Image (cartoon, rainbow, N blue to C red):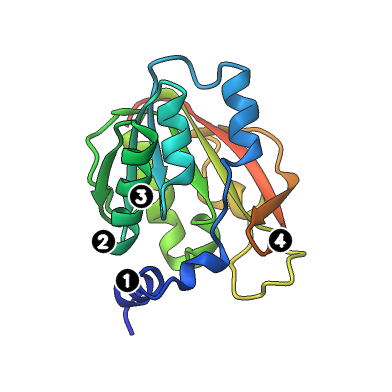
């Protein structure tokens, strides 16, 4: 089964509810409270899934684009945006070839996508972030840690971030522990903020 088929089936069969979350991510709520990113920023949610975080960011007044590989996920997300009376630009696409123009994005959010990316694809993931972010644009990445019991994930570690996000292209903050919540509980995760330095 291809990745596309797997994710399509996961959302059509409602298997996605295992990692679904009912409320916006607490760390995004905290950032929005602190006026990060700046008002009217263009936000990109990669691997947007059912759209909970993207819809929240739109409710906060940001211009939001959600990208997901699954058409079924985007249908769920569209319904959530309609119910919340907000506009989100939903696009079907792959994070390794984002359907976004160069230097178009102020802020990227990733909740649980980087930890699904295999090592051989991580350089492409990082290069796409560099391409679509504006100079000084930021990216917030959250995903499973090396201590997570979920061994199917490719963990987020300082070493992984430093390897794929070159310090000649990105300035990174600390890689910190955080719980990643779902309706079934939480798992040990890591969070890091990156800032693009220089132009594509």
Residue 96 in view: no
SS at mark 1 in the image: helix
Badge 3: how crowded within 10 Å, few (<14), some, or many (20+)? many
Residue 42 in view: yes
Image coords of residue 175 (percent x, y): 70, 43
SS at mark 2 in the image: helix
Q: Which residue is drawn at 50% across and 21% down?
A: 37
SS at mark 4 in the image: strand
Residue on which the image places disc 1:
8
In the image, residue 4 sits, relative to residue 198, either above or below, namely below
In the image, residue 45 sits, relative to residue 71, either above or below, namely above
Residue on which the image places disc 2:
71
Mark drawn on residue 185 = 4
Image coords of residue 114 (percent x, y): 51, 56
Query: Are the two marked residues, 2 and 3, in contact with CB atoms closer than 8 angstroms?
Result: no
Q: In which quarter of the image is the C terminus?
A: top left
Of residues 132 and 87, the one nearer the viewer is 87
Residue on which the image places disc 3:
77
Badge 1: how crowded within 10 Å, few (<14), some, or many (20+)? some
Query: Are the two marked residues, 1 and 2, in contact with CB atoms closer than 8 angstroms?
Result: yes
Image coords of residue 160 (percent x, y): 61, 55
């Amino acid at each position: 089964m291809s990745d596309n088929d797997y994710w399509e089936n996961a959302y059509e069969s409602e298997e996605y509810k295992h990692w679904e979350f009912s409320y916006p991510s607490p760390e995004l709520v905290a950032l929005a409270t602190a006026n990060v990113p700046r008002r009217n920023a263009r936000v990109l949610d990669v691997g947007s899934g059912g759209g909970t975080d993207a819809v929240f960011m739109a409710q906060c007044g940001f211009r939001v684009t959600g990208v997901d590989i699954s058409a079924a996920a985007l249908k769920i997300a569209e319904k959530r945006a309609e119910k919340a009376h907000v506009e989100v630009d939903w696009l079907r696409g792959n994070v390794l070839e984002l359907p976004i123009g160069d230097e178009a994005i102020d802020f990227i959010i990733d909740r649980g996508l980087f930890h699904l990316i295999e090592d051989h694809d991580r350089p492409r993931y990082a290069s796409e972030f560099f391409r679509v972010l504006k100079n000084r644009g930021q990216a917030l990445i959250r995903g499973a840690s090396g201590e997570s019991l979920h061994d199917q994930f490719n963990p987020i570690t300082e070493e992984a971030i430093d390897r794929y996000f070159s310090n000649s292209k990105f300035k990174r903050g600390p890689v910190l522990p955080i719980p990643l919540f779902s309706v079934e509980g939480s798992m040990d995760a890591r969070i890091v903020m990156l800032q693009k330095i220089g132009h594509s």
